[in-house]
Image: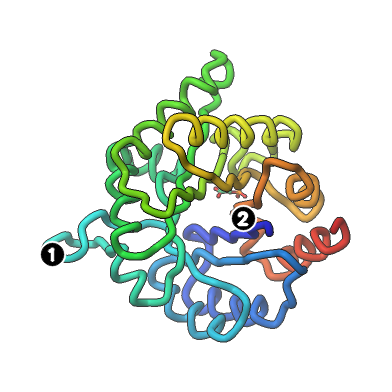
Amino acid sequence: MKYFFANWKMYLTAAESRSAARSLAGFSLPEGIRAAVFPNTLAFSAAADELGGSYWQLGAQNVDSTPQGAYTGATSALMFKEAGAVYALVGHSERRHIFGETDEAAHNKTQACLDAGLIPVVCVGESESDRKEDKRQYRLKKQLFQVFTGLNLPSGAALVAYEPVWAIGSGEPCAPADADDVAGWIKLELSQSFGLTAAVLYGGSVTPDNVAGYLEREAIDGVLSGSASTRPDSVAAMLAAVEGSG
Ligand code: PGA
């Protein structure tokens, strides 16, 4: 089983999300693919209306770590669960780098997701300067340890997205063989240090042309697509590429 996750970021309005979701609901998914859409918060209900009864699941792009209370502008994991979310992205690099989210915040949000019954998708990735300074493993290990240390994860299963920051939105994806090595390394780290069985997705400039190359890799359990996933024709092309390679 492989994951196909569509992170719509802040690209689509509610009306555009509804229309894109309606198209996606009509697509048949290739065998063995589990798919989910992560719409903008305000577009979540519209997308949920359209995808209800289809094979597509829904996820939150960002949750607050507190269930309820005086937190202006925030939306809790519990509220997303109520609205129909199954997953939530945590620690996405845009949250870290644009909104200043710390590893500690990523830990708290991950726990909040688990407490609310959402499956957290823990995003990790090295920056361009980490890459130049040969600090990839150092950065990934730090991010993984900050999130998973002290986490109450009774299932023993983790879902991680490896998203090198330099590959996101850049048109310069990480080579599938390289991403596969990193995915294997993440699995080993989480197994040895925390006793967890992890599924690892790859994200960063995934397109119809390269998606199959990731999904055919042994250690890569799926992809997290951003901008390409906002266009239904390109989602259809990605699903067709997956089907064709399977
Ligand atoms: P991208 O984004 O596909 O637009 O590079 C991926 C992500 O940030 O999840």
The secondary structure type at the circle numbered 2 is helix
Residue 232 position within the rendered picture, expressed as x and y whole percent measured from the top left: 69, 70
Split into 4 quadrants, where in the image is the C terminus?
bottom right
The answer to whether residue 56 is above or below residue 239 is below
- The numbered mark, 1 or 2, whose residue comes first in the sequence reads 1
The amino acid on which the numbered mark 1 sits, given as a three-letter code, is Gly
Residue highlighted by disc 1: 69
User: Neighbour class for label 1 at 10 Å: few (<14), some, many (≥20)?
Assistant: few
The secondary structure type at the circle numbered 1 is loop
Mark 1 Cβ and ligand 1 under 8 Å apart: no
- Quadrant for residue 32, please give it: bottom right
The answer to whether residue 142 is above or below residue 59 is above
Q: Is residue 217 left or right of residue 15?
A: right
User: Neighbour class for label 2 at 10 Å: few (<14), some, many (≥20)?
Assistant: some
Toward the right, the furthest residue is: 244
Give the CA distance from mark 1 to mark 2: 33 Å
**What residue appears at the point 21 percent right and 63 percent down from the top-left corner?**
67
Residue 222 position within the rendered picture, expressed as x and y whole percent measured from the top left: 65, 52
Between 203 and 198, the residue placed more toward the observer is 198
Split into 4 quadrants, where in the image is the N terminus?
bottom right
